[in-house]
Each structure stands twice: as structure tokens, then as C-alpha cells.
Image (cartoon, rainbow, N blue to C red):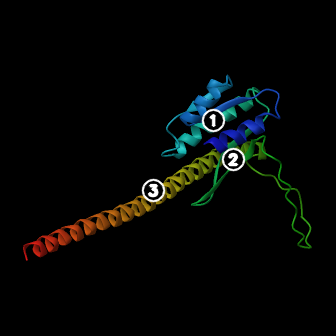
Amino acid sequence: NANVIKEAVEHMKEKEKVSVITIGQKARDYFRKRAYDLDGEFIHISEDPHYTDAQDIGRLAIELYRQELVDEIYLVYTEFVSTINHKPKTIKILPVESIEVGEEDTGKKAIGLMEYEPSPEIVLDFLIPKYIESMIYGALVEASVSEQGARRVAMESATDNATEMIDALELQFNRARQASITQEIAEIVGGAEALN
């Protein structure tokens, strides 16, 4: 969480005015305490993310963009690299960067103009929200997996430390017991010799 917040703050330093949609209580508390404009806050999503959560966040982000309250929207989250390695990542989700699609050179020329139904604008109006929701959902899942991985590593470390401590205490106990038994035997032998 701290690394993601640090990444977000570093990215926001470059901007004149920022608005924030937070996911999780720590992020909300951090940005609220520092008087950032919060356009939305979503709590308890990171433990168990659902696609409907991503849809809600995506709708809010798209609405802010359509109303021209924001010029750009970035998503900052924890990228899952491996169980022990996760890092903060920032991606731009709005405006969607244009994609250059090259025409495949097949050696054949188009016979005539083609007309598409529905229009490209209608298709994009449908696809872009789905794309954004999918990006948000992917980030939610990666963040959740990263958090679970960090917890697992922490629990493994705690278990290993507890096992080492138990072994050390068991060894200490056995030495103390052995010393006590040795002392009792020495006292018994000493008492038997005194009787002779």
C-alpha cells in the first residue's frame, strides 16, 4: 500500500490539479488527510474483488472524463510479478491511446469501399468502457494476489521464526533438565558415599 501511494503521489506531482478515486481504506485515509479532492472511494474491495466493483469504478471514471472534469485518468496499483516480488505500476486508461493498425500487404487491392454496420463510433462507445472495466478489474485482481502473496510470505517467515524459537527453547529446556538430573545423580552418589 505504501509503495502504491508513493507512486501515485510522485505521479501527481507532475500535474497541476488532481482528483482521486481511492480503492481501500488506507488510500482513502491518506488522501483525505492531505486534503486531496476525492471523487470516489471504494472500501473493502481489495480483499475480494468482483467485476461489478470494476464496473462501478469504471463508470465513475468515464463519467468524470465525459463531463470534462478530468483530462486524463491513470490507474496506480500493485503489479504482481511473483509471490515475493510485487511493484507499483501506473498505466494511463483515459484517453485511450490511438493504436496504429497497419494494413497487411497481401499483394491484393481492395475491390471497392466497404461499409461497416454499426459505425466505428458506436463500436468504440461500447468497447472502450469494457476495456477500462477490464483494466481496472485486472489491477484489482493483481493487487489482491500481491497482497495475498505478501501475507503468505510473512506467515511463512513467522512460522520459520517460531519453529527456530521452539527448537532453541526445547534445546535450552533439555540442557536445563539434563543439568538437573546430573545434579540429582551427583547428590545421590554423594549421599551414598557419605553413608559408607
Q: Secondary structure at mark 3?
A: helix
In the visual, does 141 lie left or right of 105? left
Q: Is residue 32 above or below residue 142?
A: above
Q: Picture quarter containing residue 107?
A: bottom right
Distance between the alpha carbons at the discs numbered 1 and 2: 13 Å
Count of marks placed on residues? 3
Q: Secondary structure at mark 2?
A: helix
Which of the image's four quarters has the C terminus?
bottom left
Amino acid, disc 1? Arg
Labelled pair 3, 1 in contact (Cβ < 8 Å): no
Q: Picture quarter containing residue 163?
A: bottom left
Distance between the alpha carbons at the discs numbered 3 and 1: 41 Å
Q: Which residue is mark 1?
A: 59
Q: Residue furthest top?
A: 35
Q: Which mark is residue 127?
A: 2
Q: Residue at x 12, y 70 (%)?
A: 191
Q: Residue at x 59, y 60 (%)?
A: 84
Q: Position of residue 130 (x, y in %)?
A: 65, 46
Q: Position of residue 6 (x, y in %)?
A: 70, 40
Q: Which mark is residue 5?
A: none
Amino acid, disc 3? Ala
Distance between the alpha carbons at the discs numbered 3 and 2: 46 Å
Q: Position of residue 24 (x, y in %)?
A: 55, 37
